[in-house]
Amino acid sequence: MTTQTLIVHGHDLKTAEKIAINIMGELETRKNHFRVHTRINFEIENLRSNNIVDINIINHSFNYDDIKLMVSDMDSTLISIETIDEVAKEVGLSNEVSLITEEAMQGHLDFSESFKKRLSILKGARTESFNEVYENKLKLNPGARELINFFKSNSIKTALVSGGINYFAVRVKKQLGIDTYRANEVEINNGALTGEVVGHVVDAQAKAKYIDDLCEHYDLDPNQVIAIGDGANDLEMMKLAGLSVAYRGKPILKKNCNIQINYGGLDSLIDFFDKF
């Protein structure tokens, strides 16, 4: 039996020790996390369900140092809100829009059609509501800035791809210093939404296509890409990427990813690149 290595993210020594005993492993202390090395078989989902801490397996056959590009979703991933839901709240249409958003994120609705439907509900909404949401509601998720800065300092390109509205994506890109982005352009007339999309909706297939485009642009293999998301619309790009991360992910995403971050910040991903 080959040795497996488990990352226990964070600084909870008691939990790390308990996990090490549980899987008959050797505990190693790192600066911001613990590693448990074991030669026995274990079910990681059992460990996750019994411990309130992020736990992931290091894939020893994967070269983490070969990652050259990070592509991340925006809403509920880099930022803490669903921007279109917040715009709907500003104009008194929260109930009509938020339910559609949740159904789409769970994978129960076609994303492209759900976005068009939500946008049609918001027809006539003034764009001042965008600025109100950006200034007063939009917050970066914990560890977002630290993660982006880490990638930048290690010459790893960064990209944002969003099924949300371009207005917010361009501002989050600038706020975090992300290299490039793609999002939905919506039609605006006389300072109000017309309810129409300009061009194609950035759905799951479009997100995967964006990774393809970036790989071609930077001359990379998809295996050199880390993709981060939280909902069903991120599934296709995560299947394509060499390393996939579900951040506070919906169940459908957790079943189809390499890494889960359910408790800590986005900067927990830095643990995989810790050479000590």
Image: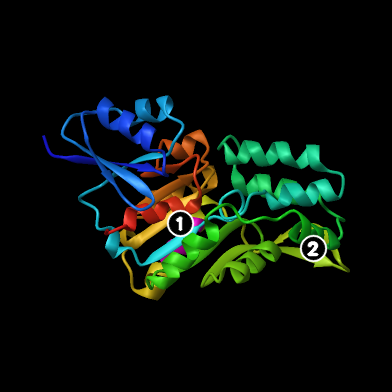
**In the structure shown, which secondary structural element does the residue marked by tag 1 occupy?**
helix
Residue lying farthest to the front in this orientation: 14
Q: Position of residue 70 (x, y in %)?
A: 43, 62
Determine whether, in the image, residue 117 is placed left or right of residue 74. right
Query: Which residue is drawn at the image coordinates 26% and 27% (left, top)?
Result: 21
Q: Is residue 81 above or below residue 15?
A: below
Q: Which residues are magenta?
A: 207-213
Q: Nearer the viewer, mark 1 or mark 2?
A: 2
Total labels drawn: 2
How would you rate the neighbour count of disc 1 (Cα within 10 Å): few for under 14, some for 14-19, many for 20 or more? many
126 or 76: nearer the viewer = 76
For residue 131, which numbered disc appears in the image?
A: 2
Position of 50 relative to 260 (above/below): above
Q: Which quadrant of the figure contains the N terminus?
A: top left
**Residue type at tag 1:** Ala
Residue 105 horizontal side relative to residue 272, left or right: right
| Residue placed under numbered mark 1 in the picture | 208
Residue found 37% across the figure and 33% down from its top? 14
Q: Toward the viewer: 84 or 209?
A: 84
Residue 130: percent from left, percent from top: 78, 60
Dot placed on the residue nearer the N-terminal end, 1 or 2: 2
Q: Secondary structure at mark 2?
A: helix
Secondary structure predominantly adopted by residues drawn in magenta: helix
